[in-house]
Image (cartoon, coloured by chain):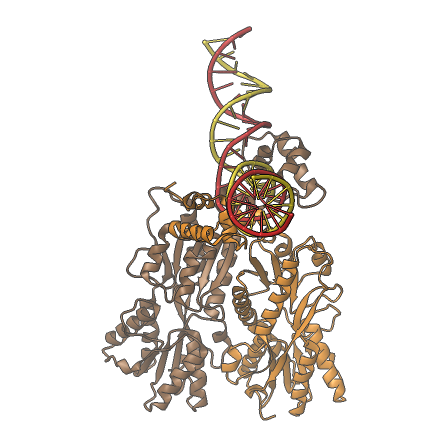
Chain colours: A orange, B brown, C red, D yellow
Amino acid sequence: MAAGRPRIKDVAEYAGVSQKTVSNVINQYEHVSDKTRRAVQEAIDALGYRVNLAGRHLRQGRTGMIALVVPELDVAYFSELAAHVVAAAEQRSHTVLIHQTGGRRDRETSALHGFDADFVDGVIISPLALLPDDLRAADRGLPVVLLGERDTTEARDHVGIDNVAAAREATAHLLAGGHRRIAVVGGRLDPASGTDRLRTQGYRQALEAAGLPFDPDLVVPVDAFHWLDGARAAAALADRGAVPDALLCLNDHLALGAIRALHERGFKTPDDVAVCGFDDIEAGRFSIPSLTTVAPDKAALARAALELLLMRVSSGSAVPLPPVEERCVAHRLVVRESTAGC
Amino acid sequence: MAAGRPRIKDVAEYAGVSQKTVSNVINQYEHVSDKTRRAVQEAIDALGYRVNLAGRHLRQGRTGMIALVVPELDVAYFSELAAHVVAAAEQRSHTVLIHQTGGRRDRETSALHGFDADFVDGVIISPLALLPDDLRAADRGLPVVLLGERDTTEARDHVGIDNVAAAREATAHLLAGGHRRIAVVGGRLDPASGTDRLRTQGYRQALEAAGLPFDPDLVVPVDAFHWLDGARAAAALADRGAVPDALLCLNDHLALGAIRALHERGFKTPDDVAVCGFDDIEAGRFSIPSLTTVAPDKAALARAALELLLMRVSSGSAVPLPPVEERCVAHRLVVRESTAGC
DNA sequence: CACGCGATGTACATCGATGTAAATAGCCAG
DNA sequence: CTGGCTATTTACATCGATGTACATCGCGTG
């Protein structure tokens, strides 16, 4: 009795009412007399009672927690995004469980089906390796919202930017600067769906619109989207001979790594090679040279994803289920030194 | 029956044993005959049973989750550290709840007492604003390990590097390069305990050892440890007139921001001003110039913190409690271009 | 052959909060 | 003063897993 946290039963005894009445007060049930409500509230304060989440969770099946599943937190774009999601969730009194998968498919699926799936009411995921089937299998009820990447084959709630348009604009900007041989670092030609492919498409569209030929040799794939990969890609291009006069890097890490590698080889940015990135991470605002980049509205992405998810969570297994939604948030091209004066 | 997830009861019926026996199999209780074990296992597989964590949590009071409380995920040091903690926790089959506090005291205390405290078995926290009393109040049983900052007035499990020595070495390196007027960006003279103060101490010790005077004007406080703050501090120094010939910045963001601001004012790093940072974030390896910095062994920090925490979690409220531990992990000075050729 | 002991297995209560159904109180019309 | 409402409150079952206490089984021993 003296030991341990007070339970609802203790509060009920202290206030001289039933457990259910205490529960009603806690849950803002409306038909409770003012007198009772006050008495219960006093008991709660006196005993320092707080609800036990395990009990509530067991009873109602909801936890008030959502999972955010991203490839890597050391990728600034994701940690910045995570910060926004956490902030948005807090406003709606939800707690965020952050997961990193390293882009590995098994980790991504296990976030949807595995251990943690039991603990959360829903999942916001930025999949890298997930296959359409993995999502379908997760259909057993866990609400899922895709953030960034979109699985083209199946209808799913999805939030992202218009990647094709964004890449087109960025490429157009480089073209407007007089650049003609523009490489796409991180680009992909193969038919897998994904951000990288959409951006590569936008790049091609821009070339086409300018009446320029598309050279597959200028599409440089990377293993991952880190500084090192950008540095390697740029090094490979430089060592290959004919260095492009501009790089469209599919994220800022690649761009900054590339600039560094070019610098080491004596190529100046933007004089010799202009460079444009994606994501607008903070590092690019202070790098030398500062980085031109496509800035997605990260706060809006986070808000939209959370809104969609909570909508689905609260609609439970209602019939009919709310229709699948596709939200496209704004982006803008931020021009800085790395493409300046072209 | 057909609907919903199978419960332990369903498995028991399917296998023709009692619920407890199923529970025993799940929990690897040793005195279960092979035959029974097999039968139960088959039932589990057949029904696709998975334990319900809410039930288990309610019954045993443990969740298998720990909280990692950091000021900001957009600070690369913390997101890199978080990545390590998550990885280490996964190995020990624990899940990490990441919290950012923005360095606000109310958020930090609420991580220790608030809503989430109910959900986790323990907390690893990098406090910025927490007061000794806040920790004492948290003594109601939630295991807490301090990471980085140390509350000097109270004994607590703590993991960190030797900040004084690290700053001393970094300063000595700058002195060895011939620099004499070295500013400390992010330094503090006031008596608050904390990493910044310890590092300022190390800086003074190095000056003293070199027989140089200490000039309080060279200690430049900052509001936060972001790029922008570093840029502002450097700008202030530059505009003030007598620019120092070296900066010891107390983290890499400050350092990179400072380099940028100096660059904008025409000062070259390292030729005009050498710059050294702390943390060894990835951005500093690829910046131009690349950044000399003090590299803490982040993986070791994460492992040690987790180990201490889980030790305390599993010892529960055993008497006697395990003694408070202080773990100091290795760091090393990584010399790069920003202090090169001095 | 009864006894005792360890190995197995079972029934039931329990963790804490809340949904359900039903009891009670309060109030008005007739 | 009673039937008929509604507003309030209550007792009890329930969510799913596991600890407790006890029953049973098998087998070696005296």
Q: How far across and how far down the image is residue A171, in percent?
A: 67, 84
Classify residue B313 as left or right of residue B29.
left
Q: How far across and how far down the image is residue B335, in percent?
A: 41, 74
Residue B337 in view in this figure = no
On screen, residue B82 above or below A52: below
**Which quadrant holds the C terminus of chain A?**
bottom right
On screen, residue A164 above or below A151: below
Q: Residue at x 59, y 76 (%)?
A: A297
Q: How far across and how far down the image is residue B211, in percent?
A: 22, 78
Q: Residue at x 67, y 37 (%)?
A: B43
Q: Nearer the viewer, residue B275 or B217?
A: B217
Quarter of the view holding residue D2: top right
Residue B74 in view in this figure = yes
Q: Nearer the viewer, residue B128 or A182?
A: B128
**Which quadrant holds the N terminus of chain A?**
top left
Quarter of the view holding residue A10: top left
Classify residue A36 as left or right of residue B154.
right
Q: How far across and how far down the image is residue B46, in percent?
A: 70, 40
Number of labels in the image equals 0
Q: Nearer the viewer, residue A24 or B275?
A: A24
Q: Nearer the viewer, residue D6 or A216?
A: D6
On screen, residue B224 above or below A137: below
